[in-house]
Amino acid sequence: MNDILHEMNALMTLYPLLTKLTIVVLAFFIIMTIVSVVKSRVNTLVDESSTRYKVRKVVTMVAYAIFIIFVIATFKKDMSGFAVAIGVIGGGIAFALQEVIISIAGWLAITFSSFYRVGDRIKIGSIYGDVIDIGILRTTLMECGEWVQSDLYNGRIVRVANSFIFKDPVYNYSGEFPFLWDEITLPIRYGSSVEYTRQTLEAIAVEVVGDFTASVTKSWKNLARTYAVEDATITPMVTIVANDNWIAFTLRYVVDFKKRRSTRDRMYTRFLEEVDKSNKQIQMSSATSEIVAFPKLHVEIDRVSTSS
């Protein structure tokens, strides 16, 4: 045993840098093994998905911090020697890994600002979906749209480099104000009761989205404390426009950012039910064409006489 320790000491004396590198590699594998065990325990013990995600992220970040501190402590005596080498190769590394560096800067901006968080619905460039993970280099989205209508998932998972936040606009559909204004337009035939139709639409809106009013008002006030936004109409609003074919009734309302499609479905369903009960006070219209006049037609008939 003493011989083995003596040999190890001799190796450490002859190859101190190699020995330290070996220790760092071993420490890395030990830390990653511990992280894997802790994450598996978290998956077993924590049922709520968002809490489980946050705990796993914290475990990962703590492990990275411990490893970095360990590396610095291991090589602290050799830092002066590394300074020259780092200065020489630093420019080349910065040029070769500029996209990686920008992505890391993007991750820092996302982490310490309000670009978006896990769970937000965002659009970056042409990519639209819900944020399901924010990594150091990439943001992962569950994509919406494309070949499916409205705000439904299409099943594709998209990974976007964090550097995109410096290149493209970031649209956040939830963020500080997790509601959206939406509207439906209904064509109503001339001769219907305008006032009755308006009251019916307002009553339906209060019934379907009335519960959102208190939450929306509170969120809007919080937003107004942060940004220079004017007061907005939170309650449902009905406006009309008369055109050549019908009276267009537009119902504008505020809805939860993840419930646009289901809310529209309830609005249309309730309105059609009220149309059936309205005793023709509300009549739906459709596109029609009116022929104002016919051109004059001149018809000539040739009679052929036959003789026996």
Image (spheres, rainbow, N blue to C red):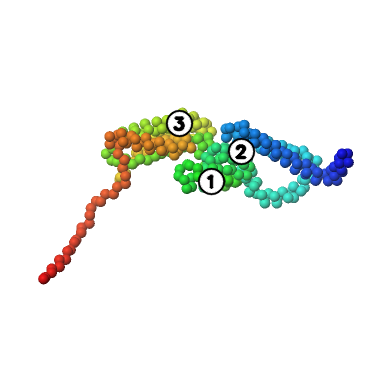
Q: Residue furthest bottom?
A: 308
Whether residue 206 is situated above or below residue 7 in the rendered picture = above
What is the count of numbered marks? 3
* Kind of residue at badge 1: Arg
Going from the N terminus, do you reach mark 2 or mark 3 first? 2
Residue behind mark 3: 212
Residue 234, percent from left and from top = 43, 32
Q: Residue at x 40, y 36 (%)?
A: 266
Q: Are marks 1 and 3 in contact (CB under 8 Å)?
A: no
Q: Is 11 left or right of 134, judged from the image as shown?
A: right
Separation of residues labelled 1 and 3 (CA atoms) = 31 Å
Q: Within 10 angstroms of label 1, few (less than 14), some, or many (20 or more) residues?
A: few
Separation of residues labelled 1 and 2 (CA atoms) = 25 Å
Q: Is 286 left or right of 146, judged from the image as shown?
A: left
Q: Is residue 27 visible?
A: yes
Residue behind mark 2: 111
Residue 28, percent from left and from top = 73, 41
Q: Residue at x 67, y 35 (%)?
A: 38
Residue behind mark 1: 156
Q: Residue furthest left?
A: 308
Q: Residue furthest front?
A: 308
